[in-house]
Image (cartoon, rainbow, N blue to C red):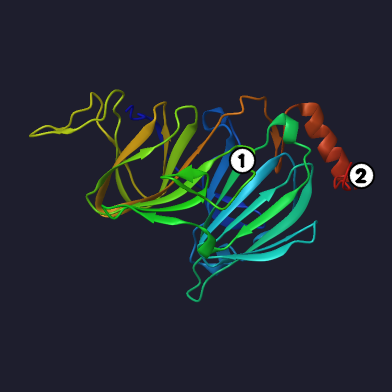
Amino acid sequence: MSIRPVSRLVKSKATLEGAGVHLRRAFGFGNTSEYDPFLLLDDFRNDIPEDYLAGFPWHPHRGIETITYVLAGTVEHGDSMGNRGSTSAGEVQWMTAGRGIIHQEMPKGDVEGRMHGFQLWANLPAAMKMTAPRYQEIKAGEIPEVIDDDGTRVRLVCGEFWGRRGPVEGIAADPVYIDVSVPPGKRKVLPVETSRHAFAYVFAGGGKFCNASGPLAVPTEGVGWADTKPPTEAGDRSLVLFDSGDSIEVQAGENGIRFLLVSGKPLQEPVAWYGPIVMNTQEQLRAAYEELDKGTFLKNPGR
């Protein structure tokens, strides 16, 4: 077994998006090759309604898939295909923009005014940039939850993990997207396919991620971790980017740790990106914005 060492530890940064939504961005809108096939991860956690109710009014997307996972409050969705829905706590909305879609996402707090969720952007390969748009809404009861013997809980949003499969299907990046909770003081090894890029985003509690580059590290009495490099401590709103290996290892702190663990097969394709549209060349990007100006951005079936 080869534990993935930590390549980088990043604290998510406060930013404004949409019509003035206050959120935290873990990565995005820069060189995202280390996260390929993923482009962006936003943590929209807030308990001040004035900071999020303006939401994300009607805007276009092309060339990507957006994954919205809600933990508190709701996100109301509408799009140019006629889909309407409300994604509530524990639920997932997965939208394939493909050749073009215009949609809006309007967050609303729970009874205490809390709003919490994540949006992840996954890139589409060149061959699928102009595929037909698609929308999937996954209810909380459809997402499998696995509880291991030590109390570790895993909610499986997408992909295959511990012999189970998540409900979201047909995603080009073939991601594994899981919500992991490790109890206080427990140490856990979680498999990640070697060919994938992988990251963890901590959003509750904290802990240490092993930096072993060889066989599974074990504690040495009186010394601690037996790695040549000490473990990386990660707390709330920290993103841990992993190097190569076939698993990750985490030691939960005194309050336990909860994090998203996301992995995907890199596309290794050129990226031309401006705002909500991601293509492979600048020419394709210019064409998309020209179509927006001319009113020809949305394509009829078969075109």
Would you call the spot at circle 2 few (<14 residues within 10 Å), some (14-19), or many (20 or more)? few
Relative placement, left or right, of 6 versus 276 is left
Which residue is rendered at x = 43% and y = 45% of the image? Answer: 163
Report if residue 21 is visible in the image.
yes
Would you call the spot at circle 1 few (<14 residues within 10 Å), some (14-19), or many (20 or more)? many
Which residue is rendered at x = 50% and y = 46% of the image? Answer: 177
The amino acid on which the numbered mark 1 sits, given as a three-letter code, is Ala
Read off the residue under disc 1.
122
The amino acid on which the numbered mark 2 sits, given as a three-letter code, is Lys
**Residue extending furthest toward the bottom:** 111
Q: How far is mark 1 from mark 2, CA to CA?
A: 27 Å
Q: Position of residue 131 (x, y in %)?
A: 77, 40
Return the residue nearer the eye: 88 or 165.
165
The quarter of the image holding the N terminus is top left
Quarter-wise, where is residue 274 in the image?
top right
Label 1: element kind? strand
Answer above or below: position of 283 versus 154: above
Answer above or below: position of 298 versus 4: below
Relative placement, left or right, of 41 versus 130 is left
Q: Nearer the viewer, mark 1 or mark 2?
A: 1
Q: Position of residue 103 (x, y in %)?
A: 74, 56
Mark sitting earlier along the chain (1/2):
1
Answer above or below: position of 55 versus 286: below
The numbered dot on residue 294 is: 2
Quarter-wise, where is residue 292 in the image?
top right
Quarter-wise, where is residue 225 in the image?
top left
The numbered dot on residue 17 is: none
